[in-house]
Amino acid sequence: MIARSQSPGSEAEETVESAVVLGPGGPVGTAWLAGLAAGLRREGVDLGAADLIVGTSAGAIVGAVLACGGDLDRLTTLPAPENDIRIDQDKLPQVFAASATPVSTGPKPSAGSAASPSPPPPVPRRPPSPECDS
């Protein structure tokens, strides 16, 4: 495989002997990919040493950390909470019931109700075609 340098104005080509391709996965995928890469690094396999690192979504995040030799373990842990949130378990049924109650039971206007009540314009008929008409 040949890779082109992404440097502006550079047309240099280099042969790629190793590549890492990392897929998506959201926060869970980020933690999983980072944990896998960190475990491989601890066992002597550094994915960041690849000639080419490609990633999508979660893979792009982990790939960027791999490419710069960053701390993969930081991606495997949840951030510390900013404040102490307490949920009153006794009030949950009341909150859920209120959120499930419809605000209005009357008719809902459709999106086109604001349009002028005029008939649609006539649609021209296409000319007859020997290929389509039987």
Image (cartoon, grey):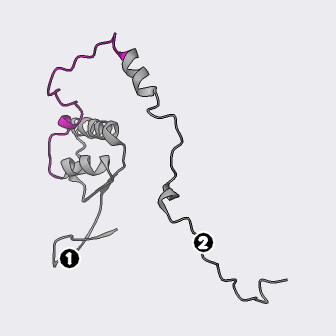
Measured from the top left, where is residue 134 in percent x and y?
Answer: 85, 83
Give the spatial CA distance, label 1 vs label 2.
60 Å
Q: Mark 2 points at which residue?
A: 120
Q: Classify 10 Å Cα crowding around label 2: few (below 14), some (14-19), many (20 and above).
A: few
The residue shown at (14%, 47%) is: 69
Report the residue at 32% width, 50% height from top: 57
Residue 89, image x, y percentages = 33, 12
Identity of the residue drawn at 51% across and 66% down: 116
Location of residue 121 by image quarter: bottom right
Q: Which residue lies furthest to the front in this view?
A: 117
Instruction: Give amino acid for label 1.
Output: Ala
Q: Is residue 130 visible?
A: yes
Nearest the viewer among 40 and 31 is 31
Give the SS element for disc 1: loop
- Please tell me whether mark 1 or mark 2 is closer to you in this view: 2
Q: What's the amino acid at mark 2?
A: Pro
User: Is residue 70 shown in magenta?
Assistant: yes
User: Which label is found at residue 12?
Assistant: 1
Q: Where is residue 129 in the image (x, y as percent from the top left)?
A: 75, 89
Secondary element at tag 2: loop
What residue appears at the point 50 percent right and 49 percent down from the top-left corner? Answer: 109
Highlighted magenta segment, given as a residue range? 68-92
Q: Tell me if 26 is positioned left or right of 107 in this view.
A: left
Instruction: Relative to 38, say whether 131 is above or below.
Output: below
